[in-house]
Image (tube, rainbow, N blue to C red):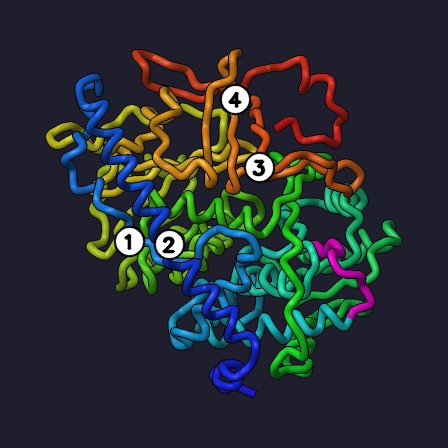
Amino acid sequence: MSAQRAITQAEASPRALQDALQGALQRALQGALQEAAQGAAQQASKDASDRPAGLATDAAPDEAPPRVQAAAPQRRVSLGSLLTATARRHPDRIAVVDPADKPDWSDRPAITWTYAAAAEIVERLARGLRSWRLPPGSRIGLCLPGSAESALAILAVEAAGHVACLLPVSWDEERLLAAAQNVALSAVLTQARLGSAAPAQRLCNVAARYFGLRYLAAFGPDVPDGVINLDRFVLDGPAGEPTGPAPESAGLISFVGGDPERPVYRSGESVVAAAAAHLVAMRVAPAERILSLIAPHDLRGLATGLAAALVAGASLETLPLFDGAAFAAALRRPGPTHLVAPAFLEKNLAGRDMPADLRSVALVHRAPTRLPGRSRAVGLPQSLRLDTVVDTIVFDETALLSGRRGTAGDLSLVLGKPERLALPATLMALRHEPDGRLAFRGQACTVKALQRGNPPDAPDGAWRETSYAPVLFAGLATAIEAVETSESADLPENFASA
């Protein structure tokens, strides 16, 4: 059955109620984002007298209300529900685009997936996962490079009611084994070939050493013996309308600093909220394209890539294996584009002419880091020849903070005076602790450290301290530095310090 036919039949089912809910949530988020933009404009007017020279004024066009239109980060809103909502209303809109050079390093075809096709494949995968003898909420590892299969697998695990555990594909056997044991993995989805590497074979070795791993599946070709072939699994598996309500999102697990001994848990609602907070600065419109150079192996890749695209109803194109020529070709592709790149690439892009269709660039930093000293004020030197440059700082797996350079949301201003953060407090709040460290609170920052695979009890509304503090000069943050604390030194190794 085609995805569009499934959508048509679903209109007469109780799931139409979910569509109505999605529409209400969409309007709610739009109001929240407009509230955030108005708050930014009011704060800019209030601070105009003491703003340092070289930063843009509140009269700049950057202060216009954001264009993001998507579902609100409220309870029971998941990535999968956003995919389904867009697939119903805009089935032919592009959802995920594979890199053109994908056949060279995976022996798999490069595919462009519409929202309708992606939703159908996700449902097929989810039905297959639900057929496995695993209790709801089981941990399923995803060791994939960040191509379309990675996005579809994340959504399928969520749709099946399990917890997706993000495993960097670069990890060796020992780190994969440690992660599997620490979070009690029941299954892993991976890929047979990645360049000269063989992730599926590597995980076969892990399965031989960790008996709790009950299922191992891989996208082909040349899937090893004893490993479930996900391509055949999808093509031959069941399809059609779900027989009952879809399981609620069980969240996901990632690892602080890529350390398999420091797993953390985040709910699906928190992922959506983190993406929505990022989009207040990024301002991606529906049907525009996000070109991401960061794999979805952690909060920074997921919230700025797949989750952001689904919240905005946009398209996502990724480059899992960076190649200069492939990147240049992707950047020149016609259509409104928003680039997400590691911050160190700024020096490579500085001074170069950008494509006319490039709407914005988000430069993603990991704390600790130095903040750029450049300004967006008219007449002063520019690093990037682009009107919209967004700085995004990720604080381990606790929070992801984004701000547009040269506006009232510039991170040098916000980190200097946290009250300038123009987001609804329920979404994200920021403060300085007495010792100078940064602390976050809100739905976008709701994350819990795991101990032996089980989330400890912790109030969702609590402030979450980080181990980072801003370096201030004249009220502006010039850098983020790590702060050693006695509490973090006393924590067991398998706790996240933030």
- Tell me the quarter of the picture where residue 128 sits: bottom right
Label 1 sits on residue: 67
Quadrant of the snapshot with the C terminus: top right
Q: Tell me the residue at 55%/52% (across/down).
A: 75
Label 4 sits on residue: 468
Residue 51: horizontal and vertical position, in percent? 22, 20
Residue sitting at the far left:
379
SS assignment at label 4: strand
**Is residue 423 within the magenta segment?**
no
Q: Tell me the residue at 68%/54% (across/down).
A: 163
Q: Are marks 3 and 1 in contact (CB under 8 Å)?
A: no
Label 2 sits on residue: 327
Label 3 sits on residue: 397
Q: Is residue 379 left or right of residue 360?
A: left
SS assignment at label 1: loop
Indicate the amino acid at tag 4: Tyr
The alpha-carbon separation of the residues under discs 3 and 1 comes to: 27 Å
Indicate the amino acid at tag 1: Arg
Mark positioned earlier in the residue sequence (4 or 1): 1
Mark positioned earlier in the residue sequence (4 or 2): 2
Indicate the amino acid at tag 3: Glu
